[in-house]
Image: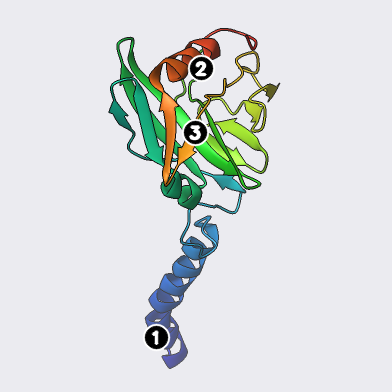
Amino acid sequence: MNALSRAAIRILPVVLVLFLAVSITACSGNSGNSDNTQNSGLIEPTWIQADVTDNTASISLNEVETNVMSHFTVNTSSGEMDFMAYELSGETYVRASICPPCYSRSFALKGDTLVCDTCGTVFDARTGSGIKGACLNYPKASVPYEITGNSIIMGVDDLLTAYNNTLEPGLP
């Protein structure tokens, strides 16, 4: 074996490691952002804690603004129910987070649309109406709320109504 072949054999592992490092970085889908925005434009949800007292639920406005897309769970007399709160063009939206046909409980925000994390159905983020996909007939009902200080305040009855409206095809 000549000196050139021996040098190539010694350098090959270093070249392979560098190649793998560059490949992993290029394919990771993370553009270096520390937030939850990915190259695909999807803003994945961050689960936050809801505080429930009597017939009132509240979540942190600051967390919703920081996360852009937040999900939270409320335990009711009818069981555990999931909701989403998100910021879009400076406005806050709160909606039921359920996709009955595919059993999804999670949605991502992409531009001005909501994308079901299970079936990929796309909904208008401003109205909750279906745009395209298998579950488009199950629009995401909105929840009325008030902002008090750093809290988004919702009635548990209003949350139940929005959730139940989302379980049925069409908007009420």
Helix, strand or loop for disc 3: strand
What residue type is disc 1 on? Answer: Arg
Quarter of the image for residue 46 reads top left
Q: Is residue 126 left or right of residue 96?
A: right
Q: Which mark is residue 146?
A: 3
Mark found first going from the N terminus, 3 or 1:
1
Q: Which label number is shown at residue 37?
A: none
Cα separation, mark 2 vs mark 1, equals 71 Å
Q: Quadrant for residue 168, please give it.
A: top right
Can I make out residue 1 in this image?
A: no
Q: Which residue is mark 1?
A: 6
Q: Decide which of 12, 146 is in the foreground and name it.
A: 146
Measure how far apart labels 3 and 2 are at the Cα level. Answer: 16 Å
Secondary structure, mark 2, is: helix
Q: Residue at x 65, y 28 (%)?
A: 122
Q: Residue 71: give x, y in percent of width and height.
A: 43, 35
- Give the residue at mark 2: 162
Secondary structure at badge 1 equals helix
Residue shown at the point (44%, 71%) measured from the top left: 16
